[in-house]
Image: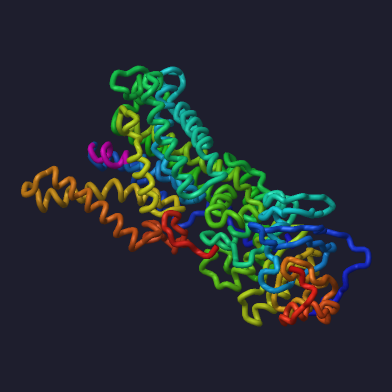
Amino acid sequence: MSDVEAPAVLDPAIRFTPRVLLAAAGLALLTAAPFLASEYWINAIVVPFLILSLAGLGLNLLTGYAGQMSLGAGAFMMVGAYATFAFQLRVPELPLPLALILAGVIAGATGLVFGIPSTRIKGFYLIVSTLAAQFFFEWLFLKFPWFYNGNSSATISLPGGLSIFGISAENPHGRYFLTLATVALLTILSFNLVRGQTGRNWMAIRDMDTAAAVIGVPIVRSKLEAFAVSSFILGIAGALWAFAYLGSASVQSFGLTRSYQILFIIIIGGLGTIRGAFYGAFFVSLLPLALDWLFQHLLGGQIDAGLLQNIQKAIFGLLIIGFLIREPEGLARLIGWKAAAPIRNPFSRSRTRR
Amino acid sequence: MTLEAPTPQQPDLVLEVSGVSLSFNGVKAISDLSFKVAQGEICALIGPNGAGKSSLLNILNGVYVPDQGEIVFAGEHFRRMHPLEAARRGIGRGFQNNALFRGMSVIDNVIAGLSRRQTASLVEEALLLPRARRQERAFRDRARAVLALFGLEAVAETTVSSLPYGVQKKVEIARAIVAEPKLLLLDEPLAGMNAGEKQEIAAAIARLNRDLGLTIVLIEHDIGIVLKLAHHVVVLDYGRKLADGAPDTIRDNPDVIAAYLGKQTSERAA
């Protein structure tokens, strides 16, 4: 029965669909961006947007694809940042790209360890376990001066600055292109993963883990792989956040607020889609700016600036709630080229038939 | 359907359940159940709701652990099965209420059933190395061939949750057989369908059995179809075996009639 002829399609991973062409156009625009936009825009908006997208992508592999909930995104970003710092400080001959990869591997291994409870527990209990990672690493990296090299302010920054194979990237374009290249590469790798058997295993576990086990999906291995890959990407995103965006970072840069932010990004953007992380990061980075601009123009000078900021935060929160009520499956479904699959939001309480 | 081929005299056993008992919090779901399934037969498990039929299938592929008893599958003895182990050894399974991966396309659902054939590692898949490409192509070809058996080629890329129930049932059977199991367990494959759909699925099951020589254990309530489709019928009631034999012997068995029509049977032990 295997002699039934299959339609001659190219390997789906390399087919030139409109989607791929659009992505290519987007990439071209991103390449030209630093020559079109001001330095402020690149440094303060585009670079953090790209890094947050990457972090969202990392968490989305775990939560959106494999269905494992996590509030430890900040922790794994922290591990990546501190590991990169340690490599650059103590093994200066190691080039930055390699240090980033190794830091990602360390973050991935960390994620794997904190993912072990997922083989036994799920849902809210798993959140608690990932929250433990968050508090543990905040404590660890503050407690032992070795991690921040005894710096009096307990912050980390690259000793030799951002430098790739001896070429300094310590300038707006350098930071931007380092970030862009890393994000693009990891996005492509993630895309390949979720289109392959690894991604199918993850989604099978997310959609119905009992059935997945019974048809032969290796549940334990797949869950741990999801934690490792997700944390690998988050670790690299954390290193970029610390050294390509902030310049110098501390544990506060990766606190629980960061974990929540990354989680909001994927919920708003769309769970279980690659592009969702980018939409979500766009929303989270640009909406506050838009609100700020709007308020400055409408109410500037009439209301106290501090109060204005708080009102903006409240409105931002309301917009998120309102948006999620209207479109619980996120921007990816709203903007999708073809109707995306209805994926059960693991955070909503409504349950489908068991 | 003309499938009256009786079980061979000296059957090659695929499955032997012996003395299996299962209870939930002290309530007996299955008591001391034994039966045999021969190579290449369709064995139907019938009985009223709550007779322990689904529980039995769950024991066979390791979702439940029996309190007592033993399972012999393909010559090997098991105190219990583990779900992954059962799948690796070739036990396929379809569920009562479709347990498809609703966010995935039809073909991805079917390919998920090939997980145990996975050879490419995660890194190979991320980098699209030759082994990953070859695996993906082989999986797609295999899945398409199986979808073709059920006439599902046209919906291959459709998200499974958007399809009608009857089509989903077929996808589920396709997913269960894609990895070429030695034994296929189907839990009410015809439930919730109209007469036409029932005939269609029953014919598909008979084809799988005849053309691929697939041994099938299925649970079904539609006695008319069961008597035509099955070579061997095991009747359960209150977790006990009430009758076991060829369809025509079952049809006239007074105990079976009593269980179905609710007549008093004095022998029923408490």
The verdict on residue B87 being magenta is no
Where residue A208 appears, x then y in whole percent? Answer: 56, 57
- Give the quadrant of residue A348: bottom left
In front: A11, or B175?
A: B175
Q: Is residue A145 above or below residue A293?
A: above
In front: A135, or A343?
A: A135
- Give the quadrant of residue B259: bottom right
Where residue A310 appears, x then y in whole percent? Answer: 18, 46
| Relative horizontal placement of residue A175, taking residue A62 as reference (left or right) | left
Q: Is residue A22 above or below residue A182?
A: below
Q: Residue furthest right?
A: B9
| Relative horizontal placement of residue A112, taking residue B112 as reference (left or right) | left
Q: Residue furthest left?
A: A302
Where residue B241 appears, x then y in whole percent? Answer: 79, 68
The verdict on residue A46 being magenta is yes
Residue at the image position 39 percent from the left and 28 percent from the top: A139
| Relative horizontal placement of residue A157, taking residue B160 as reference (left or right) | left
| Relative horizontal placement of residue A116, taking residue A31 as reference (left or right) | right
Q: Is residue B92 above or below residue A225?
A: below
Magenta range: A40-48
Q: What's the magenta bit mostly, secondary-structure-wise?
A: helix
Residue at the image position 60 percent from the left and 44 percent from the top: A220
In front: A160, or A229?
A: A229
- Give the quadrant of residue A161: top left
Q: Is residue B83 above or below residue A161?
A: below
Where residue A354 appears, x then y in whole percent? Answer: 55, 62
